[in-house]
Amino acid sequence: MTKPISIYTTAAALIISACTAAFAQNGSATAKAGNLPPVETKEANSPNNSPAFKGQTRVAGIKTTTPYEGKVLTEELKQPWGITSLPDGRLIVTEKAGNLRIVTQDGKVSEPITGLPEVHHKGQGGLLGITLDPNFGRNRMVYWVFSEPTDEGNLTAVAKGKLSADDKKIEGATVIYRATPYYKGNLHYGGRILFDKQGNLIVSTGERSDLATRPQAQSLDSGLGKVVRITTDGKPVSGNPFMKQQGARPEILSYGHRNVQGLAFHPVTGDLWENEFGPRGGDELNRIEPGKNYGWPTITYGIEYSGKTIGENKQEREGMEQPVYYWDPSVSPSGMTFYTGNQIPEWKNNLFIGTLSGMHIARLVLDKNRVVGEERLLADQTQRFRDVHQGKDGALYAVTDQGRLYRIGKK
């Protein structure tokens, strides 16, 4: 049985108007309707830091006018982290402790799928992001990210394997990529993974958080704090921006990242977008361009958890990219997806991001690569939303650290 939770609005709170061109690019009837007060009302952690351009933070609020509903399909998952859909509409979910499970549309949770390698399940480590081969219907290949334990330390690793015909085990699990160097820490693994249109893998890593490892986000000879592009065998993709640069890792697509837990391709432009945790404040949304430097830890809109400034307390520097959007105070953005379904037309091509400390799903409307409206969904649920995914039925599915799986769609 599913458990409904009413999270919808009924009265038209906004008059929606958008030009045809904006709709064509952004697919949103609310692209120019962000005329409510900003959804963030708390004092910033760094109130003296000014945005680089208008709308870079605390943009005007928006409100969904279509009645919609959320249902808790199950509360039996244990720290779910990543979610994606099988061809038949069932959902395959990673659990941080190292289990992989299948969940049916009526909320039935399978026994753990066997055959996965051991994970380093401490701190933020564990079994993380997951994606299926575009040809899964023929080859049944699954790809996932995990924190791999070794005697030298641990790291972010990517593995692949074949899901057996009976859905009970992963066959031939093989580690195809390791974001070295190893480090004896338990934080900031990144961990999202997805396929691009060319059939290559996009993977995010973290810079492992500590002062000793942070500078490696700026280093092209390190796998920490990066977005990488690899083949299904774990090799660098031909055409990567640093393929011919001596001393640089050829798998790197972009660098200067802190802890990337959100990756998604825009359904119209094809651009790669990512989000990453800031420190105390300064969570970022970025549009990724090959070879670009996204600044961490040299520039940031956040501060140390202790309240001290970071480095030279700079927010801009030549040669470093500005975030398209940032949050201060932090919402802790994690998994995200662009909505392409038909159930709620005003959500078309909007970006949906699960937030942890924010305890909501952020809906962002984009126009010409800028955020023009922000809404907070399911904010009354007090859940840490770890991942958001669009299912085969066009509804959104979200998992939370507390073990829930939500289905969000038209009422």
Image (cartoon, grey):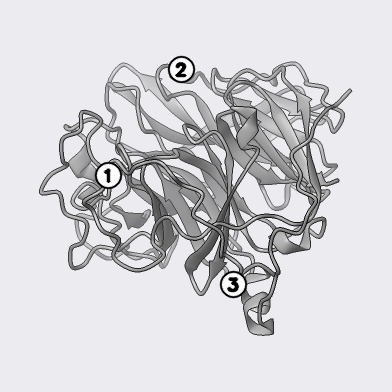
Q: Earlier in the sequence, mark 1 or mark 3?
A: 3
Provide the residue designation for mark 1: 302
Q: Residues within 10 Å of mark 2 (few under 14, many from 20)?
A: some
117 on left or right of 48: right
Q: Which secondary structure lies at badge 1?
A: loop
Q: List x then y, in percent, for residue 300.
A: 25, 50
Q: Nearer the viewer, residue 184 or 286?
A: 286
Q: Earlier in the sequence, mark 1 or mark 2?
A: 2
Provide the residue designation for mark 2: 121
Residue displayed at 81% across by 31% down: 165
Residue 235 seen in render: no
Q: Is residue 3 above or below residue 157?
A: above
Q: Nearer the viewer, residue 151 or 16?
A: 16
Provide the residue designation for mark 3: 32
Q: Is residue 80 above or below residue 344?
A: above
- Quadrant housing residue 52: bottom left
